[in-house]
Image: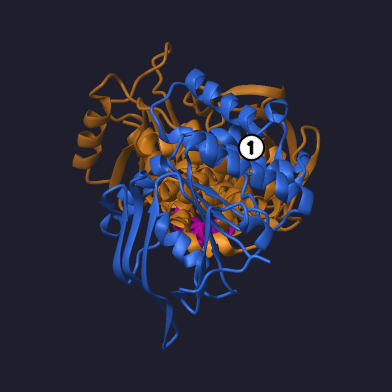
Chain colours: A blue, B orange
Amino acid sequence: MARQLIRLAGVGKNYRKGRELVRVLEGITLGIEEGDFVGLMGPSGSGKTTLLNLLGGLDKPTRGDVEVDGKTISKLSSGALAKWRASNIGFIFQFYNLLPVLTAARNVGLPLLLTSLSASQRRKHVNTALQLVGLADRAKHYPRELSGGQEQRVAIARAIVSDPPILLCDEPTGDLDRATADEIMSLLQRLNRDYGKTIVMVTHDPRAASFAHRVLHLDKGELSKKPVDLH
Amino acid sequence: MFGWLTQTAALSALNLRSLPRRPGTAAVAMSGIAALTGVFAGVLSMASGFEKTMEGTGQEDVALVLRSGSTAELNSRFDGEQANVIRFAPGIARDAAGEPEVSAELFWIVNAVGKSSGTEANVALRGIQPNGYSLRNNYRLAEGREFTPGRFELIVGRGARNQFVGLEPGQTIRFGKTEWLVTGMFETGGSVFESELWCDVNVLQSAYQLGNGFQVVRARVDGPDGRLRLEEALGDDQRLSVDVWSEKQFYSDQAEDTAALITTIGLPVSVLMGIGAVFAALNAMYASIAARARELATLRAVGFGSFPTALATLLESVVLAFLGGVLGCAIAWFALNGFQASTLAASFSQVVFNFAVTPDLLARGIVAALIVGLVGGIFPAVRAATAQVTAALREL
């Protein structure tokens, strides 16, 4: 049995909106094993992205603890969290979030600037990541010269280039057509299956969710107990 | 360990590469800072140019004898007898013929019309004696001939000729009831004398019915202690009540007052422009981080720290300011360096001087620009570092 990589215990998150206190997440207790591929679904405003941000150390819970690989990240300082993210998390966003002034290769190489690798070692890693996503021939292209699918592949290459164990995807196919979305999902599936990446993916798309090993449903900030119907 | 320095360098490179995507805001910030630097350098170059002209005037071995308490030639006065007492006092050098190297002079104010303004301004008409030429080391007749003693003739300094109408050699010009022939143009190495018109002192006395009166006696002193001996001798003489100045010190003191006045008037303008430039920089940097909010958030999500993000934002502001500063200095240099102007000096006559945009002054302009960039960048830098990553990532 695989070991538990991510553990959330009684996690809650509140936001203050003016004078009003908004409870975004409530009593989330969850375990995700190493190598798992988890889909996270739910209506808009149900707290999916907030949960993803807590897992990725971009935000801290109001209550409860988030533990990743035995480390309680919810207690880390923001500086320590930034360092932790650099080596443990790869983010994949709906709108790719590539830097328009950088080529595909330089975008992919960004996380490596936070490591002690030499320039030639960085180049090697970037090439490997771009080959893995099938875009080695687009290394010198700028984002504006790429299609949406290609941009998302570059974003995926950026997420995996420093070989983090966890990939967090926020609607990775939300801006893509069906065929391209399938390609991206197949790529994520391969990263999970062949490279052992643990993936947590927020999606509205049942078809994308069907690539996951299991799908969790969030409703009004709480995890639903009932099984998710993807059809 | 790859710490904040490497991150700052990487983020700064990214920020600067993205500058061409924001030409409008970058240009506003740069032009605001360029204007500040230009005005700042302009004011200082005016003051330094004036000081340079005044300080380039006068020699250590020439003494000026003025009536006691007079701080300008204009309000000093002697009669001919007193001038003679000074002429033969100890401490004064003698020429080859054994005559004292002295020029008793009158400093009279006449009106001439400015070439650029078209309005009348005070110009110094100096009456000199024959030694008056040699007592100015740099004196050189550049055009025409010297005035003939006893005639209503005058020679004009290069600066005066450039600034006022009717002072070309060969022309005649009327001051009061008298018509004067301009016979030549002289130079004195850019000193204040070039703002003057020179004529025979006796002719000036008769033109303005000044009797046998003088205002200043200029004398070359004999050796290093000559001025002291002259001062002691004149101080002991009951017929006189005079002050003895080193000619160099006299003009240097006059320069300080006027240069301080120029700076006092000009600096508040620069400070106001500086405040405006700070807001321009502030605005540009806020626009910069707003335009790249999602990029910055992505970088922070990837693992870049908030401190390097702040530093890189600050550095971008400073770089913009530096570019603006260089632009302002370049404008000041090309537009003002050597530009000739005149101002009313402590002598109550116009002194013609060249703006002097010196390297030191340019450095001060750049430092002012960098300060503006630093101050204007602080708040945007703090905002860039403390912006909520999660909120920025959601922005479209």
Front residue of A109 and A39: A39
Quarter holding the C terminus of chain A is: bottom right
| Residue A83: percent from left, percent from top | 35, 44
| Residue A79: percent from left, percent from top | 32, 50
In this view, which residue lies farthest toward the top?
Answer: B96
Apparent side of residue B89 relative to residue B59 in the rendered image (left or right): left
| Residue B100: percent from left, percent from top | 39, 23
Residue A170 can be seen in this image: yes
In this view, which residue lies farthest toward the front?
Answer: A1
Apparent side of residue A65 relative to residue B310 in the rendered image (left or right): left
Q: Which residues are magenta?
A: B263-286
Magenta span includes A51: no
Front residue of B361 and A205: A205
Q: Identify residue type, mark 1.
A: Leu
How many residues crowd around disc 1 within 10 Å: few (fewer than 14), some, or many (20 or more)?
some
Residue located at (24% from left, 36% from top): B231
Q: Characterize the magenta stretch by its predominant secondary structure.
A: helix
Residue located at (76% from left, 56% from top): B118
Magenta span includes B273: yes
In this view, which residue lies farthest toward the right?
Answer: B171
Residue located at (60% from left, 61% from top): A203
- Circle 1 — which element? loop
Where does label 1 land, which residue? A102
Front residue of B347 and B223: B347
| Residue B42: percent from left, percent from top | 57, 46
Residue B197 can be seen in this image: no
Above-or-below relation of B286 to A181 = below
Above-or-below relation of B60 to B386 = above
Front residue of B275 and B375: B375
